[in-house]
Amino acid sequence: MDATPAVRLDGVSKQYADSYAVHRLDLDIEAGHFFSLLGPSGCGKTTTLRMIGGFSDPSEGAVLLAGEDVTALPPNKRNVNTVFQSYALFDHLSIADNVGFGLKRKGVARNEIRQRVGEMLELVQLAGLADRRPRTLSGGQRQRVALARALVNRPAVLLLDEPLAALDLKLRRQMQVELKQIQREVGITFVFVTHDQDEALTMSDRIAVMNAGRIEQCGTPEDIYEHPATGFVASFMGTSNLMNGTYRDGEVTLDKGPALPVGARTGIADGTAVSVSLRPEKIWLSDFEPGMAKLSGVLRETVYSGPTTTYLIELAPGMTLSVLEQNTARARMEDRWSGGETVEFGWRPEHCLVLA
């Protein structure tokens, strides 16, 4: 593998008046990876994408593509293409002409355009719709056209700015799988912007979680979810029971609740104020195993969601714990609690994340 990153951001910032949209960002994106910039609205992820693409100039720092400094180059001089959320298709052109538009502007021979457009339409499963107009297609089909139009130019890096946001949930999930399959097939580096945690976890080789213009954590989906580095990442990536307390002798005594056994933690001194995170799916409500820590609380709410049920258990006044259980464990409605009962729950101490 080429050790040179496909994209390198070296101390990149974007400043507007007295505030930073992106602040001193250092980031390497390996060639051939599906890389996601993930974070809430306003965290700087789209601004970062625009600086990579050349649509926005950094206030400081450098943007490198395959080792070449392209900070001063306009978008059309960079070996990248962008798929926007709006798709930006030409309604007066056929699907084939939309896909081949960039090649025609570059003066590519007509026979080569026809061949490359045909290959791309095959890749995105639209080969039979080459003569149709964009307005006659579904949202998912228009998304595929925009993707084919970007890929036909054979860019080194493809930038995607929330391209699935306008799709309904079922189609969005289908397109997540298809987009990842296409990326693996073409082998191009994808840089994908999204605010959807499930989307990033499903599709990415690596994820950078952004907050307030900075990267809070960068790693594989498993690393980000199972070992969040900050309280923000723990709370943003899926659902987490995040509670504050004081660590002492392998327990965290919550500020307004009981003590949670979390096991001995190296590097955290007794008396340290900490946040403790425990994922809802890591908590058991029955069939406890040896070595589990246990507590009890009052069941306040039951939320049925088809394959899963979420139980909200009150540990102390104003403190509620969320527990997620697969419905295979309690398949019959009459086996579920209705609310108001005192229930016991358990967890493995090592599944608690303790953050100083």
Image (cartoon, rainbow, N blue to C red):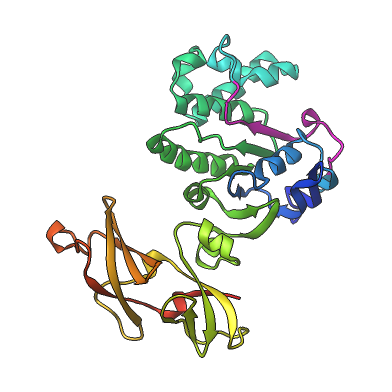
Q: Main secondary structure of the magenta part?
A: loop
Residue 266 horizontal side relative to residue 199, left or right? right
Residue drawn at x 69%, y 21% as measured from the top left: 102
Asked whether 205 or 352 is in front, the reply is 352
Residue found 28% across the figure and 59% down from its top? 301
Q: Vertically, is 95 above or below 146?
A: above
Q: Is residue 187 visible?
A: no
Is 83 inside the magenta-drawn segment? yes
Rendering coords of residue 137 (x, y %): 45, 19
- Which quarter of the rendering shows the C terminus? bottom right
Q: Does 207 sit above or below residue 140?
A: below
- Confirm whether residue 127 shows in the render: yes
Residue 300 lies, in percent from the top left, at: 28, 63
Judge whether 137 appears above or below 289 on screen: above
Q: Which one is nearer the viewer's eye here, 266 or 29? A: 266
Q: Residue 53, position in %: x, y?
A: 73, 36
Residue at 22% x, 66% y is: 340
198 lies left or right of 329: right
Residue 168: quadrant of the picture: top left
For the residue pair 98 and 15, the one nearer the viewer reads as: 15
- Residue 253, horizontal then vertical, whole percent: 48, 82
Q: Residue at x 40, y 67 (%)?
A: 318
The residue stretch that appears in magenta:
69-88
Q: Quadrant of the N terminus?
A: bottom right
Q: Does residue 49 show up magenta in the picture?
A: no
* Residue 309 falls left or right of residue 281: left
Total count of labels: 0
Q: Is residue 76 above or below residue 310?
A: above
